[in-house]
Image (spheres, helix red, strand yellow):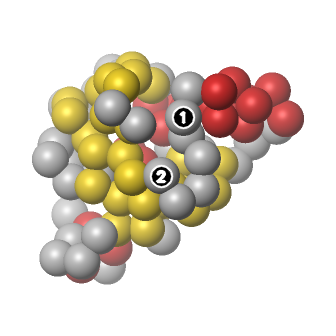
Amino acid sequence: MVPLTALQPGQTGLIHQLRGGHRFVSRLAALGFTPGAPVTVTRNHGIGPLIVAVRETQVALGRGEASHVMVYLEDGDAAVSQGRV
């Protein structure tokens, strides 16, 4: 399990957990960030917001927000989950 900020463009993960307060979790859930939903990173330049696709919608998340979205990586993304990126 890694934060969404660890994924590179084109990588997909399954949302496991949203870490934060009730307001934060409710807002992201309303945008489609629910456990088990696949999320694909479209843009992650290392600074600034991440652009992700979740439930056929593109969403921009600040890096702080994205760091609180914990995901399981799909098979083949072992290098990120082992911290080698």
Amino acid tagged 2: Ala
Separation of disc 2 and disc 1 at Cα? 8 Å
In what element is the residue under mark 2? loop
Pointer 2 residue: 37
Task: Give left or right: position of 5 versus 29.
Answer: left
Amino acid tagged 1: Gly
Which class describes the residues within 10 Å of circle 1: few (<14), some (14-19), or many (20+)?
some
Q: Position of residue 39 (x, y in %)?
A: 37, 46
- For this orientation, the residue located farthest to the right is 22
Q: Examine the rendering and report whether any part of residue 83 can be seen.
A: no
Q: Residue at x 34, y 67 (%)?
A: 73
Q: Position of residue 52 (x, y in %)?
A: 32, 33
In what element is the residue under mark 1? loop
Quarter of the C terminus within the rendering: bottom left
Task: Give left or right: position of 69 versus 25.
Answer: left
47 above or below 84?
above
Pointer 1 residue: 32
5 above or below 32?
below
6 above or below 41?
below
Q: Position of residue 5 (x, y in %)?
A: 38, 45
Q: Position of residue 83 (x, y in %)?
A: 31, 72
Q: Examine the rendering and report whether any part of residue 39 can be seen.
A: yes
Q: Residue at x 82, y 37 (%)?
A: 21
Q: Disc 2, disc 1: CB below 8 Å?
A: yes
In this orientation, which residue lies closer to the viewer: 14 or 78? Answer: 14
Task: Give left or right: position of 35 versus 44.
Answer: right
